[in-house]
Image (cartoon, rainbow, N blue to C red):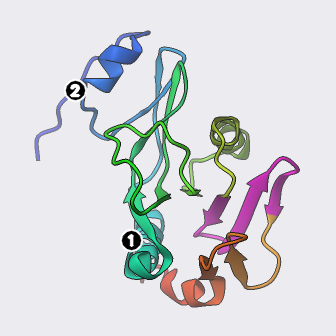
Amino acid sequence: MVASTQIIPASISMEEYLHTAYHPDCDFVDGVLEKRNGGEYEHSNLQAALGAWFFNRGREWGVRVLTEQRTRVGETRVRIADVCIIQRGGAIERVRVTPPLLCIEILSREDRITGTIRVLDDYLAMGVKNLWVFDPVDRVAMTYGAKGLKIAEGTRLEIAGTPIYLDCLSFLRCWIKPA
């Protein structure tokens, strides 16, 4: 495989970012492209499992599942959640400007908690009320809100006032480490 090098300027406009394809895609923060970690087995495996879980229940729960959708979280910021859930029947947006019902971030080995919290704060400021974080290596599920990052209590994550849930024990079986 031939590697290609893409020269990225120190600062670009929102308009340029929105009309450029990056491989892999990057978050856009105040004119600067931020690399997103991912692509390793544990991350990819869990992202696929979560996507399938929500996709298979989408009609029943009245939702759609999106993976790696650009979401404009502010005037100068675009984030790309690993998985997000939106209401079925809502507007289909090329770049999301409507807060998703749920955003899920999956940690990679290179991720640092301070960077993850900055991303989650952007979603919170945008109006996303449900934020879940998964560490597939340590097999930990967390929630994030106004009171900060908390390890999920019990074996089930839920979105209040909806039928939407995730049985974390089922997902422990999906988080298979490579041989």
The residue drawn where x is 39% and y is 57% is 67
Q: Is residue 141 magenta?
A: yes
Left or right: 3 as drawn, with respect to 158: left
- On screen, residue 41 versus residue 128, left or right, reads left
| Proximity of marks 1 and 2: CB atoms separated by less than 8 Å | no
Q: Which numbered circle lies on residue 109?
A: none
Instruction: Name the outermost residue toward the front.
Output: 89
Disc number lying in front (1 or 2): 1
Which quarter of the picture shows residue 6?
A: top left
Q: Residue 52: x and y, percent?
A: 39, 77
Secondary structure of the residue carrying tag 2 is loop
Q: Main secondary structure of the magenta part?
A: strand
> Which residue in the structure is indicated by mark 2?
5
Q: Quadrant of the C terminus?
A: bottom left
| Horizontal side of residue 160 vs 103, given as left or right | right
Identify residue type, mark 1.
Ala
- Residue annotated with mark 1: 48
* For marks 1 and 2 on the same chain, the one whose residue lies earlier in the sequence: 2
| Location of residue 23 in the rendering, given as x and y in whole percent from the top left corner | 27, 38
Q: Nearer the viewer, residue 6 or 151?
A: 151
Residue 17, placed above or below residue 131: above
Q: Residue at x 25, y 23 (%)?
A: 19
9 displayed left or right of 30: left
Q: Position of residue 122 (x, y in %)?
A: 65, 35
Magenta-colored span: 131-150
Q: Nearer the viewer, residue 160 or 74?
A: 160
Q: Is residue 159 found inside the magenta-colored segment of the image?
A: no
CA gap, disc 1 and disc 2: 28 Å
Toward which corner of the image does residue 48 lie, by quadrant?
bottom left
